[in-house]
Image (tube, helix red, strand yellow):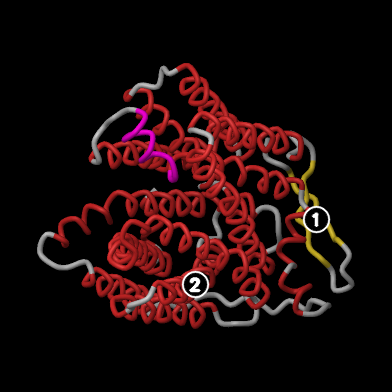
Amino acid sequence: MFSVLRNRTYRHLFTAQAIALVGTGLATVALSLLAYDLAGADASAVLGTALAIKMVAYVGISPVIGALGDRVPRRGLMVAADLARGGVALALPFVTEIWQVYALIFLLQSASAAFTPTFQATIPEVLPAERDYTRALSLSRLAYDLESLFSPVLAAGLLAVITYNWLFFGTVAGFLASAALVVSVVLPRPAPVERTGGPFAKATYGVRLFGASPQLRALLALNVVVAASGAMVIVNTVTLVRDQLGHGAGDVSLALGAFGAGSMAVALLLPRVVERTGDRRLMLPAAAVLTAVLAALTAGLAAGLLAWPALLGAWAVLGAATSAVLTQTGRLIRGSVRPADLPAAFAAQFSLSHVAWLLTYPLAGWLASRTGMTWAAGALTVIALVAVTAAWLLWPARGTGSTRTLTRAGRLTREETTTAA
């Protein structure tokens, strides 16, 4: 897997991603403490609103960036996004009102919505060989998992000697380092693609690409499955551990760590597995596993049989299956659209996947608090079951798939390719 780091351009981009992720993790911890200082007992409401603002920024900004992706130099766009994120992080320690937090979070996440899809669209051009690109996807997934485990530990160590406001300056340093690494390499710039229509038509071009491809329509359904299971973990782990099982705060981190460990294990194994199975034979069964674990969790909660070892095992399996779906989305998108359309397609995936999270996050929390954890798990199970069924039906098992594009006249063109079974 690590052989792709011999490529200087990819090595610098991957390091930039990893450093920025660590900085983001520090900011997440610091933001939680800042919210508590500003809002006290209402800190959870503040963080929940900030999370919703994050999703709105992701959903709204990414398509606009996708529309400009073939016209704006990628290196300049990524550096500008890093500098913007650093500027916002620099301002956060000085806020005194909750509305200021919301405004800065929107700016921060808007910059992230510009950086991440651009980064994702660049990697397949930096690493054109399919095998290298598969390994790069696994490394990126590993970086996300390591960040979720490493950043809280680093933050805890730093908070032993400094106040939480200083964590924001660590975030600034991370974004500046990321910008410097991006500046140090030359990135490919695709030829501009002429598209008809007004700004709205151009901004929705990537979304229409998803509607034109069976594989990408199936990916939309898979996004919903991942969001349903992920919302259960992210939103309700603390309540399950503390209230349902009666464990201490330290065990919340342990449960989330089990999820991350499962995800990391699969990310390390995926390059070898996917070469034998193909995307469809890996992603669809993994989505089915996510649904089955949610169903088992619902049954355990309903029967009052949920136990600590079972929760750890369930979270580890959910992490592993989530990684099996998410890591391969880049390969699926790359094989479904032409190279010039990669920025628009990745921006659409970034936006549409977060629509699913925007729906499942509040649903998981609201149902758990209003009707009970069993109803929350049951509702998410039903959503996942409908979505995974749709994914199986939408993604053809054999025959021909197609790399679809939209012509200048708005009509579909098709280049026949072999669909991975």
Q: Is residue 27 visible?
A: no
Q: Which residue is mark 1?
A: 415
Q: Residue at x 31, y 40 (%)?
A: 257
Is the residue under label 1 in contact with that under label 2 (CB below 8 Å)? Answer: no
Using the rendered view, name the quadrant where residue 19 is placed: bottom left
Q: Is residue 21 visible?
A: yes
Q: Which residue is mark 2?
A: 106
Residue 60 colored in magenta in the image:
no
Q: Nearer the viewer, mark 2 or mark 1?
A: 2
Q: Considering the image in quadrants, where does the C terminus appear?
A: top right
Residue 243 colored in magenta in the image:
yes
From the viewer's side, name the closer residue of 67 and 105. 105
Which type of secondary structure does the marked residue at label 2 adopt? Answer: helix
How far is disc 2 from disc 1 in space, using C-alphas?
A: 39 Å
Q: Earlier in the sequence, mark 2 or mark 1?
A: 2
Number of numbered labels in the structure image: 2
- Residue at far left of view: 161
